[in-house]
Image (cartoon, helix red, strand yellow):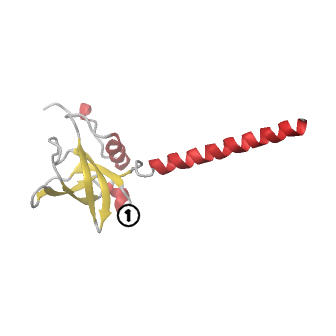
């Protein structure tokens, strides 16, 4: 009788381990498209992503770089003041999208251009995406808007 209890206990533990492994695999499979890493323009230039990799890029829209193409196609350059990367987007840009302002785009590199499927812009005068602030701080060029003298 004792051997049967021990055998049953081992079977239950093995079944629980298999269920845990299966559920972990299914969760990872379901999340594979939902995980997008953030990169600054300097990181993109230093180590280009593999073909087809979807990621987020962020920084400041470079002054004088916005060009409107045919229809709703817009091209511009995103910079972290160290490096800049050309971006192409087809769609409607957010109302607050402007040169010199913070933005984050989702897409992938095609050739030397980042082709964005989604562009997010800051939502008020003091907001900048957290990832953009961190990338600018790493470059040593971030200035807190609250510290700027009011003119």
> Looking at the image, is 112 positioned above or below residue 36?
below
Residue 21 lies left or right of residue 122; in this view the side is: right
Which residue is located at x 37 percent, y 57 percent? 43
Q: Is residue 27 visible?
A: yes
x and y, in percent, of residue 122 in the image: 23, 39
Q: What residue sits 34% from the left and 62% below the top?
A: 45
- Return the x and y of residue 146 as percentages of the image width and height: 25, 31
Q: Is residue 65 visible?
A: no
Q: In the depicted view, which residue is nearer to us: 149 or 6?
A: 6
- Residue 42: name its quadrant: bottom left
Q: Quadrant of residue 69?
A: bottom left
Badge 1, how many Cα within 10 Å: few under 14, some, many 20+?
few
The residue lying at 36 percent from left, 56 percent from top is: 54
Nearer to me, 130 or 12? 12
Give the labeled residue for mark 1: 48
User: Residue 137 lies in what quarter of the image?
Assistant: top left
């Amino acid at each position: 009788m004792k051997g049967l209890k021990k055998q049953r206990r081992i079977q239950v533990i093995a079944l629980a381990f298999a269920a845990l492994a299966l559920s972990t695999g299914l969760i990872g499979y379901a999340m594979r498209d939902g995980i997008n890493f953030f990169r600054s323009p300097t990181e993109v230039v230093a180590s280009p992503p593999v073909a087809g990799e979807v990621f987020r890029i962020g920084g400041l829209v470079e002054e004088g770089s916005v060009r409107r193409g045919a229809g709703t196609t817009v091209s511009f350059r995103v910079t972290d003041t160290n490096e800049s990367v050309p971006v192409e987007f087809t769609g409607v840009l957010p109302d607050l999208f402007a040169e010199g302002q913070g933005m984050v785009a989702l897409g992938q590199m095609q050739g030397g251009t980042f082709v964005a499927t989604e562009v997010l812009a800051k939502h008020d005068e003091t907001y900048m995406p957290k990832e953009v602030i961190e990338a600018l701080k790493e470059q040593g060029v971030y200035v807190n808007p609250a510290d700027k003298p009011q003119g």
